[in-house]
Amino acid sequence: MKNFPKFFNTVFRSLLLVVVVVGGIIVLQGQGEDDYWIFNDNDPYLDQPTREAYEHYLHMQHDGNLDVITDANGYDNFDMGVDFAEQNMTSNPRNPKWIFFGVNGSPQNARNTTNGHDWVSFNPSYPGGTCCDPWSGYDSNGVLYYGSGVSGQYVYKSTTNGNNWTSPVLSVSGNDRNTLAVDQTNGPYGGYVYAAITPGNFARSTNGGTSWTTTYSSSNTIPGVMIAVGPNGSVQGGTVLYVTNTGSTAACVYNFHYSTDGGATFNNGASLNVAGYSGTLNSVGRLVINNARMRPYPMIAMDNSYGPHRGRAYLVYSSNRPVGNGNKPDVFLQYSDDKGVSWSSPIQVNDNANPTLSDQWFPAIWCEKETGKLYIKWYDTRENPATYLTGVWATYSTDGGQTFATNQRISNASWTYPCPACGANQNCYRGDYDGMTANENVGYAVWYDPRSCNYTNMGSYFPDYAFQTIPPTSDSINSVNGQIEVIALIPSVKLYTGSVSLSASVTPNPGGALSITYPGGSVFPTPNGSRRVRLTANNLTPGTYTLTIQSEGPNGTPVHRRNVTIYASTTVTSIGNTASLPEKFELMQNYPNPFNPSTRIDYALAKNTNVKLTVYNAAGKQVQTINQGFQNAGRYFINFKGEGLASGVYYYKLETEFFTETRKMLLIK
C-alpha cells in the first residue's frame, strides 16, 4: 500500500486529463454550429429542432442560387434559399416592396427584399444562449424589430430592412416558444414593442426597444404564446391581445388576456378548449401528420382598419373533424368583437369537398391594417390524401371572417409530406410554423418547402396572376433599322383583380440604339389579357441582348419578370419554321387562348404541300385568309392578330392537299 499515493496521483492526473479533453471537445463544439441548438428530443412540451432533423439540414444545403420557379401555367414561386424552417414574415407599412422574414438557421438567418422580387440573406449576430424561433414586426415609421432566442428573447432593431442592426437587447426571460408584436399605428402607443415567451412572461418597450419591462405573467405550460395589437374604440392602437397555451398536447386551452393601455395592465378574457386532437397523438406524446410533429398554435390577429369590423380579433387553428385521435384536421377561425372575452362558433376555412378525408394544418394569419382584409394560408393534402401529397393553399375574407374566397393552391408544386420521411413514434421535426404578411393590394406567404427534400424557404404572392411571354416570329432583329415584338401575357389569375402594368429594359444597355414602346399601352386591359412590347433598332451594335419584361400591381406588388434573348445582326433568319420533321399532319390549339390582341397557331406538315389557313366568325363568315403557299414538311406557326375583330368565338381552319382540320379560339378585348 506504500505505492497507493503514487497510484492515486497517477489515476487522478489521468482522470483530470480525460475531463479536460472531454471538456475541451464540448467547448469546441459549443463554439461551432451546435452552439445555436440545445437538443432535447424527449420532452413533448418543448418545441425545438431535433438532432435528427439537424443532421438532415446539415447535409441538404442549397446550391446558392435564389431562383424564381415558374410552372407551366406561368405562376411563380420564389426560392429564397435553404434554412431550417419556422419562418415568420412581416412587411413595411410604408413600402410594400420591403418584406422581411427570420428563419431558423445555423447561425441564425434572416432574409429580405427591397423590390418585392429579389431576396438576399444575412446573419444577425447572436449574443449567447440558444437562438432562433424568430419573430419580427415593423412600426409605422418602417423601423424593423427582430426577436430571436428560446432561452430569453433578444430584440434587434433596423432602419434598413435588416441590412444593419443595433446591438441585441434582452426583451423577456423564459424558454422555448417566443413571440413579438409592434404597434403600427400613429396613436398614443404607436411604436410600442411587445414580447412574450414560455412560461407566460410578457414584456413591453416604450422607447423603441432600448429597454424592456416585464409587466405581466400568466401560466403557459404548452408552447404557443401569441400577441396581436388592435384599436381601442376610436383610439388607434393600445389594445394588446395576448394568448397563452395550457392544458395538454391533445387538449390545449387557449387563455386570452387583453390590455387597453399598451400592455401596462391586463384583464382576463375567455379560455377556449377548441383545438383538441390535430392529427394523431403518437406514443411519445406528439401530435403528428404522417409521423411529422405538429402543434395547433393559436394564431391571432386584429383588425386595425376603419372598416365595419374594426377591432375584431381573429383566432385560427387546426383541429380534427370529427374530433378524436387519428382523424383529419381542418383549419378553423373564430372571431371576437370584445377583445377576446367571447368568441364566435368555429368557421371552417378550407373548402375541399371531403374535408374529413384530408389533412389541413400549419395555418398562418395576417389582417391587413388599412383594408381589414384577412389572409390565411396552410398545408393541405386534398390533392391525394392517401399519399400525403401536400401543397400550400390560401384564402382571404373581406367580411370579417364570416365567409372565405375560393381556396387557391399557391405552391406551384406538391410533394409527399414530410420529406425526408419520419419514422413512427418519434419527435420528428419538420418545422412548427411559417408566415404570412400583406399590404393593401396582396398578401405574401412563406413556407418550408420540401419539393427537393430539403428545407427550402419558398414564397408566393396571393392573390396573384400568371405571367408569360410569347417570343417574336424571329428572335433576331436587324441591327440597322429592324423591329420585333414580344407578347406579354396574363393567361389566368388566382383571385387577382387589380391592375397590372408593364415595364421593360435591355441588357447590356444599348442606349438610344434600341427603343422600347408599347403599341397597345403598358397597362393590361383586364387582370388577364396581353400587351405588346416593341423593340426598334437604330444602328444597334450587333450582338446578344436580354430583354427583361416586368409586370407589377398598382403598388409594385405582385411583381414578376420574364427574360427574352434577342440577337442583333445585319442579317435576320426567320424562326417560323422549326427543325424536326413530324410524322403526321396536325393543327394545334392556339396559344394563348383566350387571346388579345394576337395568338400563335402551330401546325405540322408530314409532307410537302400547299397550305392555307382561314379564320371564320361564329356565324361562319370568313374574316381572314392566310395563304402560306407551298411549304416543305416541317413544323410551322402563324401569329394571328385579332385587330379589327370584335370579341367572340372564332374558328380557324387549316387546309392542305392531304389534311384539313378546324379548331375554335376565343378573342377577348
Image (tube, rainbow, N blue to C red):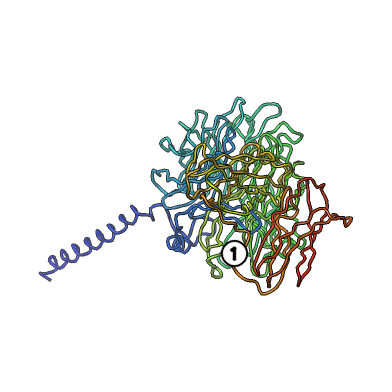
Question: Left or right of 552: which side holds 350?
Answer: right
Is 216 or 523 nearer to us in this picture?
A: 523
Q: Residue furthest right?
A: 619
From the top left corner, tell me how far across and down residue 523 is, in percent: 68, 39
Q: Residue furthest front?
A: 630
Q: Is residue 27 above or below residue 180?
A: below
Is 11 or 279 nearer to us in this picture?
A: 279
Question: Left or right of 87: which side holds 644?
Answer: right
| Residue under pointer 1 | 417
Is 202 or 467 nearer to us in this picture?
A: 467
Question: Left or right of 57: which side holds 280?
Answer: right
Instruction: Identify which residue is drawn at 77% across, 61% down.
Output: 353
From the top left corner, tell me how far across and down residue 337 is, in percent: 74, 38
From the top left corner, tell me how far across and down residue 321 is, in percent: 73, 60
Q: Is residue 5 above or below residue 295?
A: below
The answer to which image quadrant residue 200 occupies is top right
Residue 198 in view, yes or no: no
